[in-house]
Image (cartoon, rainbow, N blue to C red):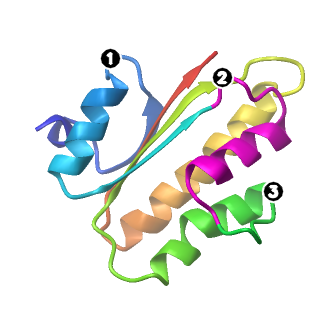
Amino acid sequence: MLLQTVRPNIVQSIRAYRVEDLAQAAVGADQHFLYANLINAQSKQEVLDTIAEAFLFPAHFGKNMDALFDCMTDLVHKAGVQPGFVLVLEQLPDNARFDREAREQLLEVFRDAADFWAERKIPFRCFYSFQ
């Protein structure tokens, strides 16, 4: 029911949603739930490392924004039919080592991934919060 109130392909602040509710909604909708807690990440590299570990990216992950996009799209798409995705990026850093520009670059990758999946009629919802 919760996911019915959220556009199917979007990147947005988590605001009124709780992680537990999003996880349950994803399971209830038979969609993948991916969660990364970035509380200990302070730099772009640490953010990418944390996401890669949390989302179980392959060892050859290039640890840059292009590689992140590839892992969120082509790699998964080639794995077969996908039911949909609910992602949570909790506690994105807000500091000099991961400034507004870096956050926007990261979120743009997820927006591009949402567009990729929208073209394939697969829901891709990404929620985020800041430290």
Q: Which mark is residue 16?
A: 1
The residue furthest left is 1
| 41 with respect to 113 (left or right) | right
Element marked by disc 2: loop
Which residue lies under the disc numbered 3?
A: 64
Sequence-earlier tag: 3 or 1: 1
Q: Position of residue 94 (x, y in %)?
A: 74, 18
**Marks 2 and 1, how far apart at CA:** 19 Å
Which residue lies under the disc numbered 2?
A: 39
**Above or below, 11 relative to 122:** above
**Marks 3 and 1, how far apart at CA:** 30 Å
User: Would you call the spot at circle 1 few (<14 residues within 10 Å), some (14-19), or many (20 or more)?
Assistant: few
Residue at figure coordinates x 48%, y 67% from the top left: 116
Q: Nearer the viewer, residue 97 or 13?
A: 97
Type of the residue with mark 1: Ala
Q: Nearer the viewer, residue 57 or 7?
A: 57
- Is residue 45 in the magenta section? yes
Residue at figure coordinates x 74%, y 46% from the top left: 48
Q: Quadrant of the C terminus?
A: top right
The residue furthest right is 97
Between label 2 and label 1, give the one nearer the viewer. 2
Q: Nearer the viewer, residue 71 or 50?
A: 50
| 124 with respect to 77 (left or right) | left
Q: Position of residue 122 (x, y in %)?
A: 32, 66
In this picture, which residue range is highlighted in magenta? 38-57
